[in-house]
Image: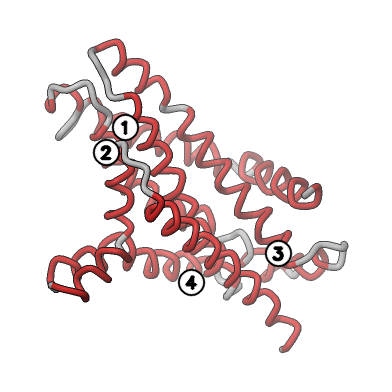
Amino acid sequence: MRTIWIITQRELQTFFDSLIAYILLVAFLGFSGFFTWLYGSDVFFVGQASLQSFFSIAYWTLFFFIPALTMRMLAEEKRAGTIELLLTKAVTDRQLVIGKFLACLLLIVIALLFTLPYYFTINSLGEVDHGAIWCGYLGLILMSAVYISIGVFTSSTTNNQIVAFLSALFIGLFFHIIFDVLADSFTGTMGEVFSTLSLSTHYESLTRGVIDTKDLIYFFSLIILGIVLSEVSLSKRNLV
């Protein structure tokens, strides 16, 4: 665990040293704040003490931001040749993958912590469903973890950051949109299968304040799958 934590700290520090973290925080807070409070189906338009508009905006904003964060994590190490140097220092592939995964997840959690004033503001405006709000934040963290694991995986398959970004976005589109569209297009068993695969089905359940074991199993299965595939992808470098 100590090695994983050292990698996590190093990667998190890299985010802040390269200004990526600041750009993410400003862009995320700018987009989410504008559409939550000022434009479209904002809080005042809805007329309810609810953060549903924020959770809807964050759902899309993070979908596009996360591949941009993860695209360099392993691809850049492979391009620069530093990954071999790193892995000779008694660091296993799994420790490296998990360390980078946690660093990116921590950055997203930090970004979400900056939105807590939204919660306190809504709470001062009227009676709120506290459970639904905290479950909504849990949903955003789990959704982010899924897309981070996908992004780390695609970054492990190439030394080109753009390819890693587009690949992560392409895979993510299936869980974010395509499975949902297919679920509406099919009936019966096929419709249920696509609905189960759709991330929005499980995310919306959480934002309503419902924590279902099936939703948690869905999110953690995808997270573990992404991490395992990343480890397998890295291990293949020894076979070349």
- Identify the residue at horizontal 76%, vertical 65% (top origin): 82
Mark on residue 83? none
Q: Residue furthest right?
A: 89
Q: Position of residue 156 (x, y in %)?
A: 60, 70
- Nearer to us of marks 2 and 3 is 2
What residue is disc 4 on?
163
The Cα–Cα distance between marks 2 and 3, rounded to whole angstroms, is: 35 Å
The kind of secondary structure element at disc 2 is: loop
For residue 58, side relative to residue 154 (left or right): left
Mark pair 1, 2: CA separation: 5 Å
Kind of residue indicated by mark 3: Arg
Pick whichever of labels 3 and 1 is earlier in the sequence: 3
Q: Residue at x 74, y 51 (%)?
A: 4
CB within 8 Å, label 1 to label 2: yes
Q: Secondary structure at mark 4?
A: helix
Left or right? Give the position of 126 relative to 92: left
Question: Which numbered disc flags the more N-terminal residue, 4 or 1?
Answer: 1
Q: Position of residue 137 (x, y in %)?
A: 40, 36
Mark 1 or mark 2, earlier in chain: 1
- The residue at which mark 3 appears reads as 94
Q: Earlier in the sequence, mark 3 or mark 4?
A: 3
Eye-nearest disc, 4 or 2: 2
- Secondary element at image label 3: helix
Name the amino acid, label 2: Arg
State the image coordinates of residue 86 (x, y, percent, origin top left).
Answer: 80, 63
The three-letter code of the residue at mark 1 reads Ala
Q: Pinpoint residue 69: horizontal percent, then vertical percent.
A: 52, 53
Q: Earlier in the sequence, mark 2 or mark 3?
A: 3
Q: Which residue is mark 2?
A: 208
> Residue, x 46% and y 52% (percent of image)?
66
On residue 132, the disc is 1
